[in-house]
Image: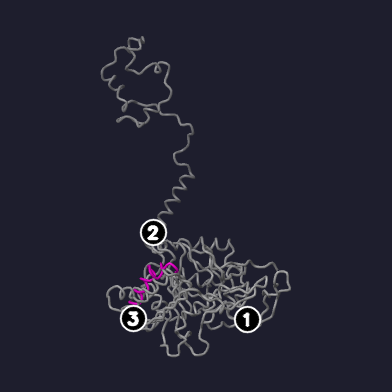
C-alpha cells in the first residue's frame, strides 16, 4: 500500500523502536498510563505540533545492509561506455548513414520518376529493355500482389514501347494461373507469358548419383527454367535490346530497378550512360542479413564473410570490401545476383554462342547457375594476375536493395543507416569463423590443364563411385565452386513431391 499523502517513504521504514517507543505512539502516552518525568509532561504546543507532523520529523538514517559507494568504478565505466555508444549510434545514423544519400546521378532518376506521370519518364534515352522472370506461384500471391504491381509501375517508368516482358511459370494451380492471366491483361507492353501446369522433367539433363539412380540436379533444373524465360531472344525476328533485367520473386521498388539499370557505374561516364556487363541489387532475408551467398563472389573470386555489412571479407586485396566501405554504387565483384540483375544485352544476343544459364559439370562441387553466367560474361584473367585484376565489368549496387518479406523491406531504409558501425566487428568475427571458405579452384584459368579431385560414378563401387584425382582442362567457373569449401551436398530435384515437402533434397558428400 502506498504511503499516505504528505508522508515520506522513510516514515514506514524506521528501525526497531526503543523499549519506551514500543508501547505506543507519542499521542497515546496518557492513555497508556505511563508516568513520565515532570519535565516532559508539559510540552509546548509548537513542540507537540512539530513532533506530530510526520513530514517534518527528523529521521534517523536507515542502516544499509551492504554499504558501497554510489557509483563504483565499474559502474561508472559502464555508464560512460553506454553513453558513448548511444552518441556514436545516433551520430552515425544522423550524420554518416550508410548508402542513404543518393549520388547526383541516382537522384536525377528519382526526380524524373516522381515529378511527372508521363509514360517512359525514367528512360530519357528510350533504351530497349527485356524483362525476364521465372515464378512458382501456385496461390497467385506474387503476380496478384505487390510484385505484380511493382512490375506494372516499372513498365510505366520505362515506357511500354521500350519494354518486352517474358515470364515463365511452372507447376501452378488454378489460382496461380488465374492471377497470371489477370496480370497479362494489365501489361501494356509486348510480352510472352507462358506457364506449364505440370512440368515434364523427362527432357532435363540427368546425372548418376551414388546408388546408380538417374536424377536431375537442382542447378540444371534452375538453369533450364531461367533459359525458358529468355526464349523470345532466340527468335531470329526478335528486336535487339540494350539491357536485360532479370527479376526474382522479391519485394522491390520500381524506381530502384530503374536506378540499377541506368545509374550503376554511370558517375564517371562522359555521356552519363551506365556501363557494365552485369549489375546486381543486394537482397536481404531479414533487415540485417544478406541472402545470396551462393552466387556472390568478390573481385578475386572469394566467397563472402559473415552475412551482414560490409558482407565481403578482408581476404586478398579486399577490393570489394573497400568499395562497399567507400559507399560506391558500383562495387567490383566477379559474380552476384541479389534478387534483381541488369545485364548488357549484347552478350545474350550475339550470333555466336550467346550467353545462357548453365550448371557446373561436377556432382559434389556445384556452382550456382547465377554465378556461372557471370563467368561466361567476363574475359578470362591472365594467368599472371588472377588476384591482381582491378575490374570485371560486374558490379553490385548497394543503393538498390530487395527483400523476401514486406516487413524486411520496410526496415531496410532504417537499418542501413547504422551499417558503418558493423565493419570492425565483421572483419574480426569473419576471420575467427574461418570466412571465406577455401576454394582450391578459385585461381584456375580457363584452358589450363589442372589436376582436380572429382567424384567419378562407378556402379561397381560400394558407395556408387569414388573420388579420384584427374587431369583435365579447367573451365572458367572454378571460382563459382561451392563457397562453403566444397562441403555442400548435392542438391537434387524431388520429382515426386508431397505436400509440405521442399522442391529439392540434398545428398550428403560421400565418404572418400
How dense is the environment of label 3, judged by Cα within 10 Å: few (below 14), some, or many (20 and up)? Answer: some
At 42% from the left and 29% from the top, the residue drawn is 62
Task: Tell me the magenta residue range.
Answer: 137-156
> Which element carries disc 1, helix, strand or loop?
loop
How dense is the environment of label 2, judged by Cα within 10 Å: few (below 14), some, or many (20 and up)? Answer: few
Q: Which residue is mark 1?
A: 474
Answer whether labels 1 and 3 touch (C-beta < 8 Å). no
Q: Position of residue 86 (x, y in %)?
A: 41, 54
Q: Quadrant of the C terminus?
A: bottom right
CA gap, disc 1 and disc 3:
44 Å
Which mark's residue is nearer the viewer, 3 or 2?
3
Q: Position of residue 105 (x, y in %)?
A: 36, 76
> Which element carries disc 3, helix, strand or loop?
helix
> Which element carries disc 2, helix, strand or loop?
helix
**Relative side of 350 to 143, left or right:** right
**Relative side of 482 to 350, left or right:** right
Q: Position of residue 120 (x, y in %)?
A: 32, 79
How dense is the environment of label 1, judged by Cα within 10 Å: few (below 14), some, or many (20 and up)? Answer: some
Q: Which residue is mark 2?
A: 91
User: Residue reaching furthest left?
Assistant: 45
Residue 193, relative to residue 420: is it above or below?
below
State which quadrant residue 439 falls in.
bottom right
Mark drawn on residue 160? 3
Which mark's residue is nearer the viewer, 1 or 3?
3
Can residue 151 be found in the magenta stretch? yes
**Relative side of 61 to 496, left or right:** left
Q: Position of residue 60 (x, y in %)?
A: 39, 26
State which quadrant residue 24 falls in.
top left
Query: Which badge, 2 or 1, comes first in the chain's sequence?
Result: 2
Amino acid at each position: 500500500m502506498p504511503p499516505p499523502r504528505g508522508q515520506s517513504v522513510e516514515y514506514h521504514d524506521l528501525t526497531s523502536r526503543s523499549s519506551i517507543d514500543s508501547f505506543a505512539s507519542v499521542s497515546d502516552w496518557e492513555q497508556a498510563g505511563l508516568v513520565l518525568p515532570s519535565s516532559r509532561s508539559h510540552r509546548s504546543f509548537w513542540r507537540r505540533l512539530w513532533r506530530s507532523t510526520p513530514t517534518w520529523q527528523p529521521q534517523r538514517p536507515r542502516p544499509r545492509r551492504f554499504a558501497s559507494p554510489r557509483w563504483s568504478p565499474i559502474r561508472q565505466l559502464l555508464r560512460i561506455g553506454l553513453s558513448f555508444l548511444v552518441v556514436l549510434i545516433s551520430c552515425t545514423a544522423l550524420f554518416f548513414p550508410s548508402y542513404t544519400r543518393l549520388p547526383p546521378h541516382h537522384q536525377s532518376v528519382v526526380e524524373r520518376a516522381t515529378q511527372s506521370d508521363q509514360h517512359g519518364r525514367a528512360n530519357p534515352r528510350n533504351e530497349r529493355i527485356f524483362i525476364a522472370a521465372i515464378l512458382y506461384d501456385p496461390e497467385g500471391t506474387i503476380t496478384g500482389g505487390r510484385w505484380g504491381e511493382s512490375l506494372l509501375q516499372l513498365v510505366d517508368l520505362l515506357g511500354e514501347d521500350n519494354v518486352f516482358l517474358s515470364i515463365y511459370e511452372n507447376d501452378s494451380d488454378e489460382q496461380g494461373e488465374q492471377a497470371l492471366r489477370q496480370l497479362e491483361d494489365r501489361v501494356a507492353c509486348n510480352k510472352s507469358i507462358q506457364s506449364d501446369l505440370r512440368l515434364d522433367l523427362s527432357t532435363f539433363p540427368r546425372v548418376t548419383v551414388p546408388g546408380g539412380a538417374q536424377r536431375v540436379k537442382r542447378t540444371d533444373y534452375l538453369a533450364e527454367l531461367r533459359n525458358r524465360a529468355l526464349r523470345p531472344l532466340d527468335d531470329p525476328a526478335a528486336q535487339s535490346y540494350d539491357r536485360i533485367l532479370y527479376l526474382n520473386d522479391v519485394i522491390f521498388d520500381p524506381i530502384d530497378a530503374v536506378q540499377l539499370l541506368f545509374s550503376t557505374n554511370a558517375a564517371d561516364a562522359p555521356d552519363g550512360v551506365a556501363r557494365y556487363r552485369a549489375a546486381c541489387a543486394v537482397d536481404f532475408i531479414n533487415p540485417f542479413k544478406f541472402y545470396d551467398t551462393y552466387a556472390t563472389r568478390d573481385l578475386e573470386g572469394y566467397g563472402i564473410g559473415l552475412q551482414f555489412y560490409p558482407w565481403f571479407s578482408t581476404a586478398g586485396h579486399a577490393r570489394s570490401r573497400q568499395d562497399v566501405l567507400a559507399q560506391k554504387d558500383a562495387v567490383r565483384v566477379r559474380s552476384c545476383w541479389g534478387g534483381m540483375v541488369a545485364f548488357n544485352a549484347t552478350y545474350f544476343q550475339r550470333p555466336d554462342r550467346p550467353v545462357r544459364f548453365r550448371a557446373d559439370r561436377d556432382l559434389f562441387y556445384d556452382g550456382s547457375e547465377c554465378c556461372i553466367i557471370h563467368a561466361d560474361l567476363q574475359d578470362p584473367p591472365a594467368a599472371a594476375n588472377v588476384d591482381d585484376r582491378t575490374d570485371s565489368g560486374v558490379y553490385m549496387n548497394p543503393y538498390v536493395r530487395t527483400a523476401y518479406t514486406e516487413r524486411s523491406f520496410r526496415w531496410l531504409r532504417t537499418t542501413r543507416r547504422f551499417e558503418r558501425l558493423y565493419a570492425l566487428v565483421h572483419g574480426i568475427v569473419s576471420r575467427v569463423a574461418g570466412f571465406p571458405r577455401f576454394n582450391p579452384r578459385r585461381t584456375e584459368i580457363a584452358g589450363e590443364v589442372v589436376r582436380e579431385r572429382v567424384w567419378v560414378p562407378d556402379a561397381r563401387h560400394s558407395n556408387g563411385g569414388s573420388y579420384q584425382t584427374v587431369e583435365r582442362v579447367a573451365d572458367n567457373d572454378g571460382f563459382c565452386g561451392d563457397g562453403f569449401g566444397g562441403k555442400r551436398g548435392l542438391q537434387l530435384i524431388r520429382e515426386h513431391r508431397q505436400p509440405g515437402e521442399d522442391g529439392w533434397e540434398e545428398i550428403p558428400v560421400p565418404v572418400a
